[in-house]
């Protein structure tokens, strides 16, 4: 059974810092991996989707990497801003034809002005 | 506007009562999903449907039921058999193709009176 762990559980940084969020998963037979952002009391917003054949994806100040064989993904946020404060969730996609996602518990980020 | 709508935003359930959460999408997506989120935890899959008139149990289906009579609608019923229903419920949909991302609704918070 796939298990997903995100480290750290919480992170507080001053504005402008570069930071890395870590995600590890136990079953490397994944179809893809997604990173989501969740603001308090809201739904999820997709940030980046990495297919299993890819090593990384970039969108603006965000860069996600995937090492499927070692069961790891990282989300790099450059030049953090207070608006980046949210919970970030990692979700590997099931390798079957269902599109099911298995979620980690998330990393709650606070960026201080 | 295209998107996923969930209603109501807040729902109160009395003991022994069944309640139904609505999820509608106008994105023409084939697959739809229901997740449950408890405080400080990641999302867990309740039910999913890849096509009209067909649905499958997720990891925590006990105490819940669904229907998929129309492509755009995937309502979730929380039955009296679900003893701990207080949670944040999120609906998602996905376009055809396993490499596609999931899109999430704004969520319904269910509370027990």
Image (spheres, helix red, strand yellow):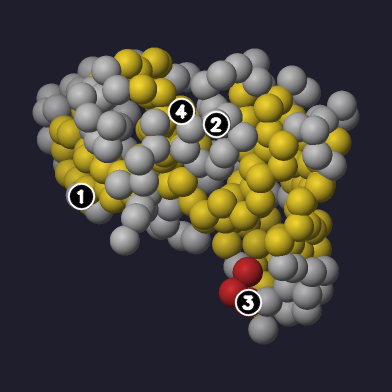
Same subunit, tags 2 and 3: no
Q: Quadrant of residue A81?
A: bottom right
Residue for point 78% across, 79% down:
A16
Check the image and name the residue furthest to the bottom. Answer: A113
What's the chain of the residue with tag 3? A
The alpha-carbon separation of the residues under discs 4 and 3 comes to 31 Å
- Relative height, residue B70 to residue A41 (above, below): above
Q: Which badge, 4 or 1, is on the more N-terminal residue?
A: 1
**Closest to the observer, B57 or B73:** B73
**Closest to the observer, B29 or A100:** B29
The alpha-carbon separation of the residues under discs 2 and 1 comes to 30 Å
| Disc 1: CA contacts within 10 A as few (<14), some (14-19) or many (>=20) | some
Classify mark 1: helix, strand or loop.
Answer: loop
The alpha-carbon separation of the residues under discs 1 and 3 comes to 30 Å
Q: Looking at the image, do the residues carrying marks 2 and 3 touch, with CB atoms under 8 Å apart?
A: no
Residue for point 85% across, 36% down:
A67
**Closest to the observer, A72 or A96:** A96
Residue identifier under label 3: A82
Q: Quadrant of the N terminus of chain A?
A: top right
The alpha-carbon separation of the residues under discs 2 and 4 comes to 19 Å
Point out residue A23 in the picture as x, y percentages from the top left corner: 75, 41
Q: Quadrant of the C terminus of chain A?
A: bottom right
Residue for point 40% across, 16% down:
B57
Q: Looking at the image, do the residues carrying marks 4 and 3 touch, with CB atoms under 8 Å apart?
A: no
Classify mark 2: helix, strand or loop.
Answer: loop
Circle on res. B45: 4
Residue identifier under label 1: B8
Point out residue A87 in the picture as x, y percentages from the top left corner: 58, 56
What's the chain of the residue with tag 4? B
Classify mark 3: helix, strand or loop.
Answer: helix
């Amino acid at each position: 059974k796939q298990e997903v762990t995100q480290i750290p559980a919480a992170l507080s940084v001053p504005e402008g810092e570069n930071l890395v969020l870590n995600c590890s998963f136990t079953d490397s037979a994944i179809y893809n991996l997604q990173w989501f952002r969740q603001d308090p009391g809201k739904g999820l917003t997709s940030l980046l989707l990495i297919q299993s054949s890819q090593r990384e994806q970039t969108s603006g100040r965000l860069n996600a990497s995937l090492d499927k064989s070692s069961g790891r993904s990282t989300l790099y946020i450059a030049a953090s801003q207070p608006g980046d404060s949210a919970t970030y969730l990692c979700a590997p996609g099931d390798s079957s034809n269902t599109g099911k996602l298995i979620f980690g518990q998330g990393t709650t980020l606070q960026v201080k002005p | 506007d295209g998107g996923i709508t969930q209603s109501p935003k807040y729902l109160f359930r009395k003991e022994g009562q069944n309640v139904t959460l609505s999820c509608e999408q106008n994105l023409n997506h084939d697959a739809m999903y229901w997740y449950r989120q408890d405080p400080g935890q990641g999302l867990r899959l309740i039910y999913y449907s890849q096509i009209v008139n067909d649905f499958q149990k997720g990891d925590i289906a006990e105490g819940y039921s669904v229907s998929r009579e129309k492509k755009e609608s995937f309502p979730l019923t929380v039955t009296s058999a679900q003893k701990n229903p207080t949670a944040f419920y999120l609906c998602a949909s996905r376009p055809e193709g396993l490499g596609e991302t999931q899109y999430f609704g704004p969520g319904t918070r269910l509370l027990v009176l």
